[in-house]
Amino acid sequence: MAAHCDICGKKPGFGNTISHSHRRHSRRWNPNI
């Protein structure tokens, strides 16, 4: 099930979290609905 808003059509954003030692982990920001 995709996390998107039926009213405004927002979709989750994708990016990376980078720790203090610059380890990258992919993460997803769900729309705040």
Image (cartoon, rainbow, N blue to C red):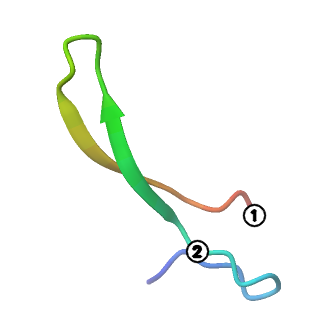
Q: Residue furthest bottom?
A: 6
Name above or below for residue 16 compared with residue 13.
above
Q: Position of residue 21 (x, y in %)?
A: 19, 12
Where's residue 9, x and y in %? 71, 84
> Label 1 near label 2: C-beta < 8 Å?
no
Can you say which quadrant of the picture contains the N terminus?
bottom left
Q: What amino acid is labelled 2 in the image?
A: Lys
Identify residue for label 2: 11
Task: Name the residue nearer the viewer: 13 or 31.
Answer: 13
- Residue at the spot 28% in from the left edge and 11% down from the top edge: 20
Residue holding disc 1: 33
Q: Reply above or below: 30 against 19.
A: below
Query: Quarter of the image holding residue 30?
Result: bottom right
Number of the front mark, 2 or 1: 2
Lateral position of residue 2 relative to residue 21, left or right: right
Which is more N-terminal, label 1 or label 2? 2
Q: Against 14, is 18 above or below?
A: above
Q: Sort mark 1 into few (<14), some (14-19) or many (20+) by Cα contacts within 10 Å.
A: few
Q: Amino acid at mark 1?
A: Ile
Tag 1, which secondary structure? loop
